[in-house]
Image (cartoon, grey):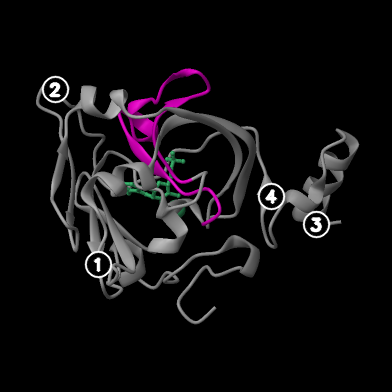
């Protein structure tokens, strides 16, 4: 039996439904850290989050503006294109759709480009970021999100591979046409649905 089959069997032995694993993924209890560049540090008094591009009005949020918006908690499985998945991760933050609503969307808005430090981007269809579980997350496992995992704020779009969830999020650029982000320019899939194994361009 290979590694992936053993991993699924071990889940079943723990009473965990192995069918929660998308194809080609294994489950881990660890939380690997993956990113390009150095972990940025922030002065939260100067920190800002911007919503711009194809919007009715540009919005600039301070940290306290963000915390004044409705806060939600979710528990979700996450899936990385490097094949690890982690079950039942707990997050809190603000729904992306609530932040987009502050800016107002024209009917032509169809995609977003998420921006994060240092110079990272990920593109997503608008439809993928307006659901209940698409967050600007500031809390993981009941504690402030660690800098390694994107604190103070990251996007979380758990139904897509984790490269679509931008650490050290700085803003949302609303687009009328799709524009590839960092990994999408480097051969990754435009959408990245783990259940369809959309890892690389052409999958
Ligand atoms: N700003 C930024 N966000 C990023 C990345 C990055 O390099 N920079 N890497 C992405 C990739 S490829 C993955 S797999 C996840 C990893 O998140 P984690 O380190 O919390 O596991 O962050 C994503 N978000
Ligand atoms: Mo990744």
- As helix, strand or loop, the secondary structure at mark 2 comes to loop
Residue at the farthest left position:
46
The residue depicted at 19 percent of the width and 58 percent of the height is: 55
Residue wearing tag 3: 2
Query: Do the residues under discs 4 and 1 have CB atoms within 8 angstroms?
Result: no
Q: Earlier in the sequence, mark 3 or mark 4?
A: 3
Pointers 1 and 3 in contact (C-beta within 8 Å): no
Q: Which numbered disc, 2 or 4, marks the residue that appears first in the sequence?
A: 4
How many C-alpha atoms fall within 10 Å of the one at disc 2: few (<14), some, or many (≥20)?
Answer: few
Please state which of the two labelled residues, at mark 2 or mark 3, is closer to the viewer.
Answer: 2
Name the N-terminal-most of marks 4 and 1: 4
Q: Quickly name the residue at label 1.
A: 175
Q: Earlier in the sequence, mark 1 or mark 3?
A: 3
Neighbourhood count class around disc 1 (C-alpha, 10 Å): few under 14, some 14–19, many 20 upward: many
- Between circles 3 and 4, the one closer to the viewer is 4
Residue 95 at x, y percent in the picture: 41, 40
Image disc number at residue 63: none
Q: Which residue is mark 4?
A: 26
- SS class of the residue under badge 1? strand
Which of label 2 and label 4 is nearer to you? 2
- The response on whether ligand 1 sits within 8 Å of label 4 is no
Q: Residue at x 49, y 51 (%)?
A: 131
Q: Residue at x 42, y 27 (%)?
A: 71
Highlighted range, magenta: 134-160
Query: Which labelled disc corresponds to residue 43?
Result: 2
């Amino acid at each position: 039996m290979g590694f992936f089959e053993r991993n699924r069997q071990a889940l079943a032995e723990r009473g965990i439904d192995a069918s929660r694993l998308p194809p080609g993924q294994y489950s881990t209890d660890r939380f690997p850290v993956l990113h390009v560049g150095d972990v940025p540090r922030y002065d939260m008094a100067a920190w800002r989050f911007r919503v711009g591009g194809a919007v009715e009005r540009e919005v600039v949020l301070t940290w306290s503006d963000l915390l004044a918006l409705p806060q939600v908690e979710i528990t979700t499985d996450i899936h990385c294109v490097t094949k690890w998945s982690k079950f039942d991760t707990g997050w809190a933050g603000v729904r992306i759709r609530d932040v987009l609503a502050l800016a107002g969307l024209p009917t032509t808005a169809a995609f977003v480009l998420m921006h994060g430090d240092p110079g990272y981007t990920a593109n997503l269809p608008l439809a993928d970021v307006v659901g209940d579980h698409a967050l600007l997350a500031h809390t993981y496992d009941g504690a402030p999100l660690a800098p390694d995992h994107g604190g103070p704020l990251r996007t979380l779009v758990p139904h897509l591979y984790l490269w679509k969830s931008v650490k050290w999020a700085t803003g949302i650029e609303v687009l009328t046409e799709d524009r590839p982000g960092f990994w999408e320019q480097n051969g990754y899939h435009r959408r990245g649905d783990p259940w369809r194994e959309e890892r690389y361009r052409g999958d």
